[in-house]
Image: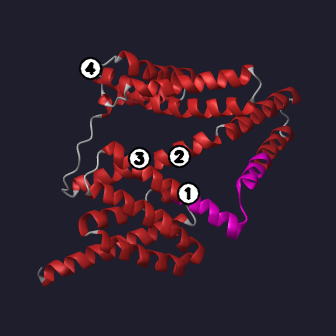
Amino acid sequence: MTRSDNTRILVESALLVAISTLFCVLDAYIPIFALVYPLPIVILVVRRGLRAGIWATVVTIAATSMFVGPFQGLLVFTKVGIIGITLAQCIRKQFSPVKTLAITAVAVAVSMAFTIGVNLLIGGFGIEETWEMMQKSMDSAIEFYRRIGVAESEISRMETYLSQITEAAKIVLPASLLMVVVAVAGFNYLVARLILGKLGHKLVELKPFSRWRLSWHYGWGYVAGLILASIGQVAAVPLVSNIGTNVMSVFGMVFLVQGAAVAWYFFDKYKLLPIAKWLIMIFIVLNPTLLQILSWAGVLDAWLDFRKLSS
């Protein structure tokens, strides 16, 4: 390796470490950066190897701790180190997209558990405090509407509606956390693929979205959740009902993605303009009834194969 090659590698590594540190520092003030700050380490590991990624993570932890404190620096270990290096290794080893997503999701779950644990130990901030903050926010909103003269009958309906939402959120919290984990893993994987593809890296082929499809076996997961939720309600056993609701929520979201893929397939088949496709999908997302229909379409596609992909 020539001196110019070494210089180029050092400059590239330093630049990616600087970007990673910037994301981590900004995350202390703008949490949205948590979605993207494993990416510089992912790119570095894929291009320069595991050792470079480990050293970059150590430097990022030290730099972040210096700028925004050791607590934030400690979280960098999980959010950058565990997620970034895990995803990068999956890409380097040419794992399939499904396997990469599954392994990365486990890394995100470990990172999330570590973050929650650190918050509990150091900050004393847990789930109960989150519900209390939500309740205070809703109370403040209700009080605001009362001050501006909204009728008490409307306020009463609003309180009932918000209370129902809160209770529903508590029930489906496990499913919600699982979906967040998968969404974070999937987002980082897709963005990493986009960047690495632009840099000329050969990646495992990812099917077009319109051809995404799960086997019919997964449809029974949704049915099982529906049965458990129904049995729990009829037998008045909240635990069984809650388990069924969470299972149904997870598979409902999975098949919502498949339903969107089915819709996109027919958009392509009938040659709709890209702007028309996106406008229709946005309209469906904003309409709860159509969103549920799209999820059911995904479930039915697992058995009926509307797109005839299996043949």
- Please identify the residue farthest to the left as the structure is shown: 2
C-alpha separation, residue under disc 4 versus residue under disc 1: 41 Å
Q: Which residue is mark 1?
A: 112
Disc 3 packing (10 Å; few <14; some 14–19; many ≥20): some
Which residue appears at 54% of the width and 35% of the height?
Answer: 250
- Circle on res. 180: 2
> Quadrant location of the C terminus?
top left
Q: Amino acid at mark 1?
A: Met
Q: Amino acid at mark 2?
A: Val
Residue sitting at x 35%, y 26%: 264
The residue carrying mark 3 is 102
Question: SS class of the residue under badge 1?
Answer: helix
How far apart in space, not on screen, are marks 3 and 4 (Cα)? 31 Å
**Sequence order check, earlier mark of 2 and 1:** 1
- Pick the quarter of the image with the N terminus: bottom left
Helix, strand or loop at label 4? It is helix
Tell me the quarter of the picture where residue 37 sits: bottom left
Position in image of residue 151 (x %, y %): 86, 29
Question: Which percent across, then down, holds residue 179?
Answer: 52, 42
Task: Find numbered disc 3 in the image and state the secondary structure of the residue it sits on.
Answer: helix
Question: Residue 290 colored magenta?
Answer: no
Apparent side of residue 24 relative to residue 11 in the rendered image (left or right)? right
- x, y (%) of residue 96? 29, 45
Q: Which residues are magenta?
A: 111-135
How far apart marks 4 and 2 lie (CA) works out to 32 Å
Q: Are marks 2 and 1 in contact (CB under 8 Å)?
A: yes
For marks 3 and 2, give the one nearer the viewer: 3
